Amino acid sequence: MIKTNMLQNLKILVLCLLLVSFTFPGKEKITIYLAGDSTMQTYKEAETPMRGWGQYLGQFFDEDVMVVNKAIGGRSTRTFLSEGRWQGIVDALQKGDWVFIQFGHNDNSSKPERHTAPEDYRDNLRKFVNEVRAKQANPVLLTSITMRRFDEQGKVNTAIGPYPDITREVATEMKVPLIDLNQKTGNYVQAMGAEAAKELYMWLEPGEHPKYPDGLQDDTHMQEPGALKVAELAVEGIKELKLKPLVKNLKKPKLTN
């Protein structure tokens, strides 16, 4: 009789566990793919002190969001496509995923191996958006971050050819969420001023870092303080756009290098 009762209780327990698993399904994980250039990419420790803002983005989300950073230096929309990097993202996409797309710096390059004509850039962005949506995923367009360039009146020049404007136009045309990092970083750098903004970028005095004994003056790429700030501005954009469910998964970051 005791064994019979134990067996019956075990069956009831198993049944209850099954019912709970059907009633309360596990929370779905969200993946954010990043497609972009060197200002967004993840850098190896050996490449210190250079950092890309994309490598900090995941620290602003809880464990239910995974950021997969596919951004890579020197790539324009054209070469990101021709090298198969974009197709790799599309092939991996699942319903409900997100793709953050930020190009422009290399599309605007004078180097022929990188340059993308403005109308081709426009078409490439449209292609990106359409292919993400075809996988029932969510595209987000981002304008390129500003360079540290000031005119004689002390006004920051955020222009990167026509490419930020084209990104804005495609976002409007295709009703795609837009995070205007060009404007946001421009405003932030302007508020800091030309001299103070050096701490954001790869500006190093001779002897300041062993990797650059002669110093460096790079107004495009960023060190940790700059990359982290851009990630914060991207998160600010997510909040402003009220991108669901991403806003529900944001947290105060516990920062690591």
Image (tube, helix red, strand yellow):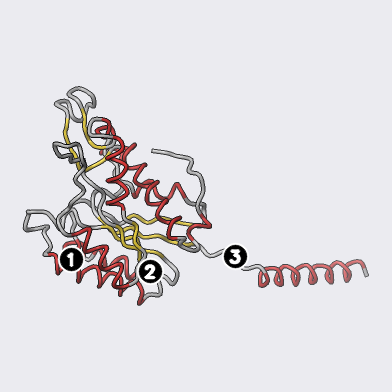
Residue 64 screen position, x and y as percent: 51, 57
Position of residue 211 relative to residue 135, above or below, is above
Residue 238 screen position, x and y as percent: 42, 56
Position of residue 167 relative to residue 195, above or below, is below
Upstream in sequence: badge 2 or badge 3: 3
Image quadrant holding the C terminus, namely: top left
Assess disc 2: are there few (<14), some (14-19) or many (≥20) residues with their C-alpha within 10 Å of its C-alpha: many
Residue labelled with disc 2: 93
- Depth-wise, is mark 3 or mark 1 nearer the camera? 1
- Disc 2 and disc 3: Cα gap in Å? 20 Å
Assess disc 3: are there few (<14), some (14-19) or many (≥20) residues with their C-alpha within 10 Å of its C-alpha: few
Assess disc 1: are there few (<14), some (14-19) or many (≥20) residues with their C-alpha within 10 Å of its C-alpha: many
- Disc 2 and disc 1: Cα gap in Å? 22 Å
Camera-side residue of 109 and 150:
150
Upstream in sequence: badge 2 or badge 1: 2
Residue labelled with disc 1: 121
* Amino acid type assigned to the residue bearing label 1 in the image: Tyr
- Disc 3 and disc 1: Cα gap in Å? 40 Å
Residue 89 screen position, x and y as percent: 32, 65
Residue reaching furthest to the right: 1
